[in-house]
Image (cartoon, rainbow, N blue to C red):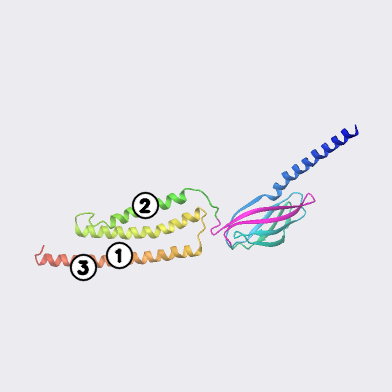
Amino acid sequence: MQNQARERLLQMKKILLIGIVFLVLLAMPIYAEQNLGTFKKGNCINLMQICDNCTYVNFTSVMYPDGTFEILNLNATKQGTMFNHSFCNTSYIGTYIINSEGDLGGIVTSGSFKLYISSSGIERTDNPIGIIVPIFSLLINGIILLFAFKKNIIKNEFVNFILRRSLMVFGMFLLVLNSAIIAGVAEYAGLDLTKEMFMFIEIFGWAGYAAIIILIFTSIAQFMKAWKIKKKNKRMGNE
């Protein structure tokens, strides 16, 4: 009888222990697992934790996107059930893992959550517009330039010259515009463009505008020269 009583007591202890572990596992995600979202590089972020039964929360450490680890030891400010503290070391692009500690229900409990830093502050998306728009834009640009470099579009020499050069100018303008469109779409899609890439796009744009101006003036000069030669040949009866 005593053995049976002991076995029942052991079984009850096991069931009680399993129940306690189960309740802890249910409670921990409420405190520990959070995703703060996406923020812009270089900006300060308000780290937040919600804990109903905590008297304190401390943001203990951070794992940076490059794998480096830093001790923070930031005591959060309590506002009701919300604990927050400002975090400004956001110079790296990528995912940050912030570790925290609090006395959940009187028991010291560790937690972690993540946030993402991008150059634009926009979350990455799988929106197909990020691929479709640049491809369609470049396709139109390619068709225009293809016609521009075609030797004879129409039979009239001067009209053909004006049409070809106009298409060249328009094609170059679209090429410059496309670089800005692609950069804008990339930023909208949440792709991270570095300062160097933006600088390259800006230099490419100004170089494109300079090339357009040169092309316009050289086209006018060539047209005037060909027009004078045609008039001269007509006066001399060569035509």
Q: Distance between the Cα atoms at labels 1 and 3?
A: 14 Å
Residue matched to label 1: 216
Amino acid type indicated by mark 1: Ile
Residue matched to label 3: 225
In-front residue for pair 36/28: 28
Residue at (42% x, 66% y) in the render: 203
Amino acid type indicated by mark 2: Leu
Callout 1 crowding tier (Cα within 10 Å): few <14, some 14–19, many ≥20: some
Residue matched to label 2: 139
203 in relation to 46, above or below? below
Residue 86 in percent (x, y) is at: 67, 60
Label 2: which secondary element = helix
Label 1: which secondary element = helix
In the picture, residue 56 is in which quadrant?
A: bottom right
Between label 2 and label 3, give the one nearer the viewer: 2
- Please state if 51 lies on the left or on the right of 68 as rendered: right
Residue 155 in percent (x, y) is at: 19, 55
Residue at (66% x, 59% y) in the render: 62
In the picture, residue 167 is in which quadrant?
A: bottom left
Residue 70 in percent (x, y) is at: 67, 62
Residue 36 in percent (x, y) is at: 63, 53
Q: Residue reaching furthest right?
A: 2
In-front residue for pair 119/212: 119
Q: Distance between the Cα atoms at labels 2 and 1?
A: 24 Å
Residue at (75% x, 45% y) in the render: 24
Q: Which portion, as a residue range, is magenta?
A: 92-121
Quick check: is 188 in the magenta stretch?
no
